[in-house]
Amino acid sequence: MKITVGHTPDSDDAFMFYGMLTGKVPSDDFTVTHVIEDIEELNRRALKGDLDVTAVSVHACAYIPNYTILRSGGSFGIGYGPIVIAKQDMTSDQIKKSKIAIPGKMTSAFLLLQLMIGRFDHVEMKFSDIPAAVRDGVVDAGLVIHETQLSFEQEGAKKILDVGKWWHKTTNGLPVPLGTNVMSNRFDIATIRKFDRYLQESIKYGLDHIDDAMDYSMQYSRGKPAELIRRFVKMYVNDVTVDMGRPGEESIRMLFQMARKEGLVPEFNLSIS
């Protein structure tokens, strides 16, 4: 069966798909054509339903009812997650009144920050451009995701809010739901679960061959040093990535329960494999 699989040009996604996309983990059931796009572009493509399997922000699942969430391949922070950076310290009131750069309206980071501080003035831009926009005064603050969570100080910025820690405290320790993989409901549930197991095998292969998988992931390092990329991958490819289990599923359901209460997402039926 030929299927299209979308993932981001990010080192953690590349690590997860290393076994699958290099043929190290073969499949008798699937022939994969992979598509590389920024996460917000993948979110938009999921709205159109033109990929069979794709990485998306958990937030985007509120708007793509024709997809089922896979149990493997999720990006969950364990006590950490997106942060807000600025050139100088700011009070809570100042932050709420600021113009904040965000990496996309359908990113989970944007939804989480709204839950944390309420609705705020924002401007969308590519996530990798956010530190420079903060540094140059284009925006007052920036919502930071991916490996920039670790490199923001090199950009001359400081952390003023920690969204991941807020979530951890608010939910009594649930993992932070950030990204997930979904599969089109054009496929029956047996096929979806079969692909889910295939992806899980790919992730396990990467973890069992971590040096080779890291070398593969470095093609998506965006010029960041290998030590930082290794640290980032280890943060977001963890036990909940292999299988979200009850904690991961509960965190996703909690996110949408809180968001619906605040009127930030519509009512919808959440489908998890």
Image: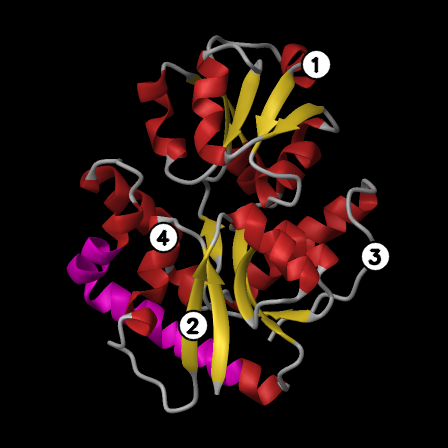
| Camera-side residue of 243 and 218 | 218
Residue 177 visible: no
- Residue, disc 2: 33
Residue at 33% across / 73% down in the picture?
20
Q: Quadrant of the C terminus?
A: bottom right
| Camera-side residue of 93 and 68 | 68
Q: What range of the chain is rendered magenta?
A: 193-216
Count of numbered circles on the image: 4
- CA separation, marks 2 and 3? 33 Å
Sequence-wise first label, 1 or 4: 4
- CB-based contact (under 8 Å), mark 2 and mark 4: no
Residue at 70% across / 14% down in the picture?
97
Sequence-wise first label, 3 or 4: 4
- Residue, disc 3: 267
- Residue, disc 4: 12
- CA separation, marks 2 and 4? 19 Å
